[in-house]
Every structure is written in structure tokens, then in C-alpha cells.
Amino acid sequence: MVNDRLIALIVLIAALFTGHIVDHAVRGDIAWDLTWPSVLSLIVNGGIFLLIALGLVLYVNGHIGPGVWAIAAVLGLALGWFGHLSPFTEQTPQYIYGCYNSPAAGALALGIFFALMIALAVALIYAAQLWIRTRREAAAA
């Protein structure tokens, strides 16, 4: 059964991810040349958008359930943590904020990132609850 709230969360995550990719482009992290790191970055980011779109189509048509979205949210949270919050990253929130001449622009970039992380956490919790409920209903039937 398709859940409209879960779909809305996924669309919100896609929109926030778009904002985060724009932040990376503005900061110069995404080069538009044909060097290997640039091509890899475009493939990864494009692949994430493709997986979101494909996942939505499969979910709406009943081919996958909320468990897939819970797993995807875990992967997204891990990627965000390793990319910007772990002790192993160079692109900490302080770095991101410092890349902008305007405090408002730096705050906006960080706000988008943290909103993305919060949306992923909410989607994880919500999708996991739907997944558990679906499995219980299937077992009871």
C-alpha cells in the first residue's frame, strides 16, 4: 500500500539534496570538466537522483515497500555523516560556512544540509514503522 506521507518525505529529501548539490557546485566542489574526479562526482550525484526516481516509480507501482526507503535513508544518513560530520572529513560545517562571503549564504547552505539530514532521519523512522506494520499485517493474514 502506497503511503502519501512517505512519498512527500522522499520528494522533500530529493529537493533538499538538490539544494545540497547546488551548494557543492557554488563552492566549486563540482568541476564541469572531464577529469576522473569530476566525472565520478557527476555519476554519483546523477545516480542518486536516478535511484530516487526509480524507487518512487517502483514504490507507487507496488514493486518495493517502505523497507527499501528505510535502508536508503540509512545510506543517505551515513553518506551525509561521512561527508560532513565525521572526524575524517575536510568539509565540516565550519568549512562550508566559511566558503561563503555572506553569513546568510553560509547559514542557508548549512540549513539545507541539516534539513536534509533531519528529513532523512524522519524518513528512516517513518519508513521503518511502515515496514514493521506491513510485515505484521502480512503475517496476520
Image (spheres, helix red, strand yellow):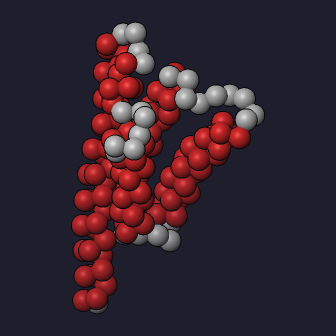
Does any portion of residue 5 appear in the rendered image? no
On screen, residue 39 versus residue 82, left or right, reads right
**Could you tell me residue 67's position as x and y percent?**
37, 69
Residue at 30%, 80% (x, y): give it.
135
Residue at 55%, 29% (x, y): give it.
29
On screen, residue 13 versus residue 133, left or right, reads right
**Could you tell me residue 77's position as x and y percent?**
36, 51
Give the tally of numbered discs. Answer: 0
Which corner quadrant of the image does residue 125 belong to?
Answer: bottom left
On screen, residue 89 versus residue 22, left or right, reads left
Does any portion of residue 121 appear in the rendered image? yes
Quadrant position of the N terminus in the picture: bottom left
**Could you tell me residue 140's position as x and y percent?**
24, 89
Which residue occupies the extreme front position in the image?
Answer: 88
Residue at 55%, 23% (x, y): give it.
28
Quadrant position of the C terminus in the picture: bottom left
Which one is in front, 1 or 108? 108
Which residue occupies the extreme top position in the image?
Answer: 101
Residue at 47%, 61% (x, y): give it.
60
**Could you tell me residue 50's position as x and y percent?**
58, 51
On screen, residue 122 versus residue 10, left or right, reads left
Q: Indicate whether 127 appears above or below 121.
A: below
Which one is in front, 61 or 127? 127
